Image (cartoon, helix red, strand yellow):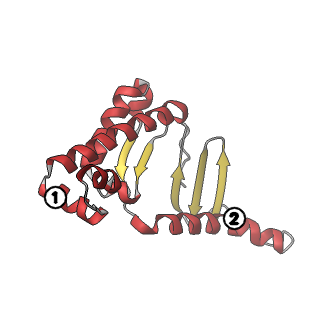
Amino acid sequence: MPRLLSQSWNRPVTWPDLLRLLDEGNPGACRAVADAGAYIGRAIAAAVNLLNPKLIVIGGDLAKGGELVLAPIRTAIARNALPPAARNATVVQGVLGEHAEVLGAATTVLADSPRILASRLGGAIDAHPQRASATSTGRSRYFDLKNSAVAVEADNDRPERN
């Protein structure tokens, strides 16, 4: 978005500049962010129709726009997705910020570590599901690390928490 505003305004605009302009209520910046949210929401609506997700997390630089981005995304999903799928989908702002990729990778590795350890030790260790496990069924992936459950779901089957 900053690049597009830079082209339109014939001056450099960075993400910090854009955030400042949004805080100041600059009409051009607010409109650009709202328009971007609407276009992104239309694309997400197609994914909602295909995958029927329960939760859609908007992260990265885009999430820094807050409700100015999230509200048009929600509206576009409501208008463009099948009504039952749109009602089931919740759009939220990511809270992990710049650490999202690293934490996701670490979660994946930790979830798989009991299986990997057991296979390297020739099955000598029982990877007890209550301690750490990862199961994948269809479009869902469920991680349970010492009873702190994290579920990533794309269908209507919710894993039970022990």
Residue drawn at (54%, 36%) of the image? 51
Q: Residue at x 15, y 47 (%)?
A: 27
Residue contact at pointers 2 and 1, CB within 8 angstroms: no
Report the amino acid beneath label 2.
Answer: His
Packing grade of label 1 (10 A; few <14, some 14-19, many >=20) is few
Q: The C terminus appears in which quarter of the rendering?
A: bottom right
The one of 25 and 76 positioned closer to us in this rendering: 25
**Depth check: 152 or 58 in front?**
58
Q: Nearer the viewer, mark 2 or mark 1?
A: 1
On the rendered structure, is 64 left or right of 21?
right
Task: Say which residue appears at 27% left-offset and 66% top-offset.
Answer: 16
Q: Position of residue 121 (x, y in %)?
A: 83, 75
Residue sitting at 75 percent across and 68 percent down? 116
Determine if residue 74 is in view. yes
Q: Where is mark 1, residue-wise?
A: 23
Q: CA distance from mark 2 to mark 1?
A: 50 Å
User: Residue lying farthest right?
Assistant: 122
Q: Secondary structure at mark 1?
A: helix
Q: Is residue 126 visible?
A: no
- For residue 124, side relative to residue 13 (left or right): right
Quadrant assignment, res 79: top left
Left or right of residue 113, residue 155 in this image: left
| Rendered image: mark on residue 14 | none
The numbered disc on residue 128 is 2
Residue 122's place in the image compared with 42, above or below, is below
Q: Nearer the viewer, residue 29 or 45?
A: 29
Task: Classify residue 18 as left or right of residue 120.
Answer: left
- Measured from the top left, where is residue 63 in percent x and y? 34, 55
Q: Is residue 111 above or below residue 30?
A: below
> Residue 109 appears at what percent x and percent y?
64, 67
Residue 132: where, in percent of width, then height?
A: 63, 65
Q: Considering the numbered disc 2 on the image, is that residue within a helix, a strand or a loop?
A: loop
